[in-house]
Image: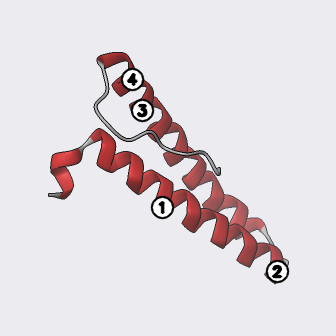
Amino acid sequence: MGERIKIGKTNMNEDLQLIKRLEYMRSLHREMDEKIKETTDEFSRKRLQKEKLGLRDQIMRLEHLVYPDATA
């Protein structure tokens, strides 16, 4: 999850890769909800929630790269 996101102009292949990455990260985000619901240990739940927030931040950065005009 600690990957750096490349910022700048991209070609069509890179755009498709970003979109696929975005879809994958969104699915991970949804899976985190299930893991959080299933976890009974409060410490583990907090850790998972923190990871989910970090994942959401990465998703937002990718969304800005894929759909730059949507946030303007």
Query: Mark 3 highlights which residue?
Result: 18
Q: Is residue 62 above or below residue 9?
A: below
Callout 1, which amino acid?
A: Asp
- Secondary structure, mark 4, is helix
Query: Mark 2 highlights which residue?
Result: 43
Q: Residue at x 65, y 50 (%)?
A: 1
Task: Residue 59: give x, y in percent of width and height.
Answer: 45, 52
Q: Quadrant of residue 65?
A: top left
Of the two numbered discs 3 and 2 in the rendering, the one whose residue sits closer to the viewer: 3
Task: Residue 45: give x, y in percent of width and height.
Answer: 75, 75
Nearer the N terminus, badge 1 or badge 2? 2
Using residue 34 as the reference point, say whether residue 27 is left or right of it. left
Determine which of the numbered discs, if any, sits on residue 16 in the image: none
**Mark 3 crowdedness (10 Å alpha carbons): few <14, some 14-19, many ≥20:** some
Callout 2, which amino acid?
A: Phe
Query: Mark 1 highlights which residue?
Result: 57
Do tag 3 and tag 1 residues touch (Cβ < 8 Å)?
A: no
Nearer the N terminus, badge 3 or badge 2? 3
Callout 4, which amino acid?
A: Glu
Q: Residue at x 60, y 63 (%)?
A: 52
**Mark 1 crowdedness (10 Å alpha carbons): few <14, some 14-19, many ≥20:** few
